[in-house]
Amino acid sequence: MSIWRRWVRLWDGVELPWSMAMVRLLLGVAMLFDFLSMVPTGLVDVVMVSEDHGGVIKGGEWSAPPLWWQLFGNDAASAWGLFTALVVSSFLLTVGCLTRTSAAVLMLLSAQFAWMHGQGDRGIDTLMRNVLMILAFSRAGHAFSVDAWWRTGSFVGDGEPIPRWPRRLLLLQLVAMYFAAGVSKYAQHWWPWGSYTALWYIWHDWPVSAVAGQRWLESSVALRFSQLATFVSITWELTFPAILWMWAAWRRGRPAWVRRVRPDLIYVFLGATFHLGIAIWLQLGIFPWAMLALYPAFLSGREWARIWDAIRSRNLRRVLEAVQIGP
Amino acid sequence: MSTDATDSGPDEATWAHLRAAVLAVVVLVHGIKVAPLPHKVHPHELKDPVAQEEVARWSERLTSLGYTIAPDELGERVVDVTDGISRVHRGLTAPFRPIMRWTGTNQGWALFANPDTHPSRFRIDGIDAAGERRILFQNGDPEHTWMLPQLKHRRIRPIFDAASVRRRPNAPYRRLGAWLWARAQEDHPDLVAIELVMLETHPVPPGSKKKARKPKARHKTKVPK
């Protein structure tokens, strides 16, 4: 088969909608809570307006001001308008109402926010917008959504298959991200010649650490644990593209152990542990939660359907068997 | 459940080829963007003690491998090479920059690539009319938590986080100072000024031969001046 034909086949085909629907729902919840967190802290009209109007954003003349400011001005009312639009669009995405439009609008509004406050816009925001772009072209609203209810009379939907390319593109994005993050770690402290002390130093990094200054960090046990965690993190990130080989091997059916052991799920489990660790040790806001929101994509819709059936039958063995059917 | 439409009717097959072509462009552009190439290193960045430590260590390693190069020369080489790489990288993706700007999509995942071995602790001092100082806020200090929910919020924290690695305060940090002063006037009317202090610390791993040094102020910003 020619390379082009293989490429076409890679993006072709359909699958059950549960994975992408869960990603949409969880990402929507994460973004909604992230935006709402600006209300109790009183930051809405601080991080969305310029210093001339009491905010922390650059004032004066901009060579290319954000479109939102050009249309609605640069003051507290405009900030609350943008905030409301972000909240409404993330809520609509969460409940799956006009899903594709909501995803596209949320992405564009988030980009305007990033334009205003570039320093407050982190890698995770870029990743979320990349995923919103994928969701805008997917049929993630075919399940667990108001759109599904309009279409089928059921919030769950009727399980009609959806194109599978968006989930594959999302997985490719995650593989590229983890690998690039691993290769970018050029500092000595990530490597044996730096004694794998990177995480130990990151735990001491006052602005981002949740544990900096605690005395137990100075114990040799903490150092050893951080070295192990550093080694696992860098190895896991650098070898993450191996998951692509595992999926291909699963499809070919050889080597046989790939189907039996499902090493891809070991990588996924390590990733979930990695993000939960970040949630405990570091203060990176939405980062670990938004990342975990994307993890349902690692299982196919068919696997989620079998897991759900197994959970309903309250049989743990069947839950474990359910993930043996492959990505 | 999965099906393959490449062998189905002509319309579906055409659509499948069209979709594959569009995705090829998307993957190519984002593939160039995601390529883990080193970012452009500016000469002033090499003056940072963390960067100097890195360059010195790499110089030692390269020398031990038979490629003798002094830290200064290595630093200059890094600036030249990363500048060249950055130009090529930017040139290749230039046509797509407007769409990426408007959609806010991009790639670039240097997550904790270079851990700060001299992390700074952010402190805010209040100064009253008698010149007396008191700590209003200090990172990781449960007794001085003025504005803690705001300062640890992910939309504010990066402002002082970015300033924590610099020798001098940058413009966003000074704007943050102005905003904090406006808030301090409401919450602490007895104050005549606040001072933002970025205290450089020197954690030393247990068992290391290095000696711990006392924290020192990397920079101080008094508001109003």
Image (tube, grey):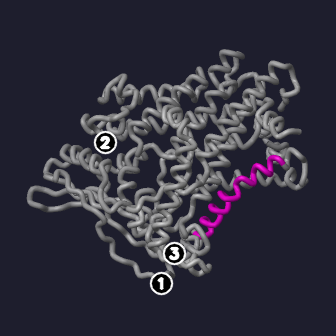
Q: Quadrant of residue A94?
A: top right
Chain of the residue under label 2: A
Q: Secondary structure at mark 2?
A: loop
Question: How busy is the neighbourhood of tag 3: few (under 14 within 10 Å), some, or many (20 plus)?
Answer: some
Q: Residue at x 32, y 26 (%)?
A: A73
Is residue A30 visible to us here? no
Q: Amino acid at mark 3?
A: Arg
Q: Residues within 10 Å of mark 2 (few under 14, many from 20)?
A: many
Boundaries of the magenta span: A227-248
Q: Amino acid at mark 2?
A: Val
Residue A233 is inside the magenta segment = yes
Residue A239 can be seen in this image: yes
The answer to whether residue A86 is above or below residue B143 is above
Residue A56: give its label.
2
Image-based side of A283 in relation to A270, left or right: left
* Residue at the image point whose x is 59% and y is 75% from the top: A193
Q: Which residue is mark 1?
A: B209
For the residues labelled 2 and 1, the Cα–Cα distance comes to: 43 Å
Q: In the picture shown, does residue A245 fall above or below B213?
A: above
Give the Cα separation between the discs numbered 3 and 1.
16 Å
- Front of the two marks 3 and 2: 3
Q: Position of residue B211 (x, y in %)?
A: 41, 82
Residue found 37% across the figure and 38% down from its top? A40
Q: Secondary structure at mark 3?
A: helix
Residue sitting nearer the eye, B173 or B12:
B12
Label 1 chain ID: B
Query: Is A199 on the left or on the right of A35, as rendered?
Result: right
Return the residue at label 3: B57
In which quadrant of the rendered view does residue A84 lie? top left
